[in-house]
Amino acid sequence: MRILIANDDGYLAPGIAALVQACQGLGHIDVIAPEQNASGTSNALTLSRPLSVFQARGEHIAGFRVVNGTPSDCVHVALTGLLPHKPDLVLSGINNGANMGDDTLYSGTVAAAMEGYLFGIPAIAFSQAEKGWAHLDAAAATARAIVEQVLAAGRPGPWLLNVNIPNRPDAASLPRLVTRLGRRHASEPVIRQTNPRGEDIYWIGPAGDAREAGEGTDFHATANGAVSITPLQVDLTDHAQRGSWAGMLGSPLA
Ligand code: MN
């Protein structure tokens, strides 16, 4: 069993060290993570410059390889030449904060796992539901339990799971629900400030609150003391509306 672990918070983030530690004994582990915090970079690849890879040094991160790029860069480079073998499983995280509903479109954590999935490898993205790393050990134990479960099930890949774990000391013993993505309200307004040269600058506002958070959603599960496991797919086609568009545009369905 060969496991590739990446994240989007950067190689120094506590979440990836906790995930790597929790997965000890499951097989050979390669860790390839971004140099900088790359949260919110989605599936971006760096095409305008070459990428460098260096070995991390220090307690908890010894052996990690570091890429001066995005989360998708890390997994892409790993799978297209850096690793001498194809991993059996790609893990991403543990992220500092939720990746639920619309977050999944912006998330570098989900994107790193998705890059594995796009290369035909089973992949899981792990996030804690709240920022701040409270009860990270319990989240890591939960991640380990889920990895063990899916490995034992031996389900053929590719598949992609998005896991959000409540920040609780008893996370590993909470029920685990298979959910669907909820929806968020549109993001909060941009925050305008003035820089020292008197020019306007803009900070992207925080993500909106949950809008569709009813039973069955990831938001509902984590708000009610369960671990949320959402199977994801990548096809963005609006299958249900293809017929109505064909009629409206007078264009036959292909
Ligand atoms: Mn992040």
Image (cartoon, helix red, strand yellow):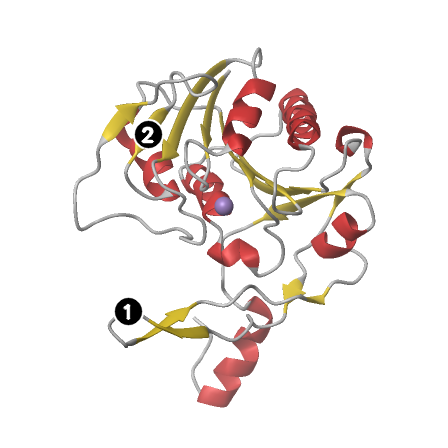
Considering the image in quadrants, where does the C terminus appear? bottom left
Q: Residue at x 66, y 66 (%)?
A: 209
Question: Given contact means CB atoms under 8 Å apart, are the residues at marks 2 and 1 in contact?
Answer: no
Q: CA distance from mark 2 to mark 1?
A: 34 Å
Query: For the residue carrying disc 1, how many other residues have a C-alpha within 10 Å: few (<14), some (14-19), or many (20+)?
Result: few
User: Left or right of 215: which side holds 113?
Assistant: left
Residue 15 drawn above or below residue 195? above
Residue sitting nearer the eye, 182 or 10: 10
- Secondary structure at numbered mark 1: loop
80 on left or right of 226: left
Residue occupied by mark 1: 196
Amino acid carrying mark 1 in the image: Pro
Q: Which residue is mark 2?
A: 66
Q: Nearer the viewer, residue 19 or 117?
A: 19
Residue 238 position, x and y percent, is: 54, 68
**Taking 159 as reference, is 77 left or right?**
left
Q: Nearer the viewer, residue 222 or 114?
A: 222
Say left or right for 200 vs 8: left
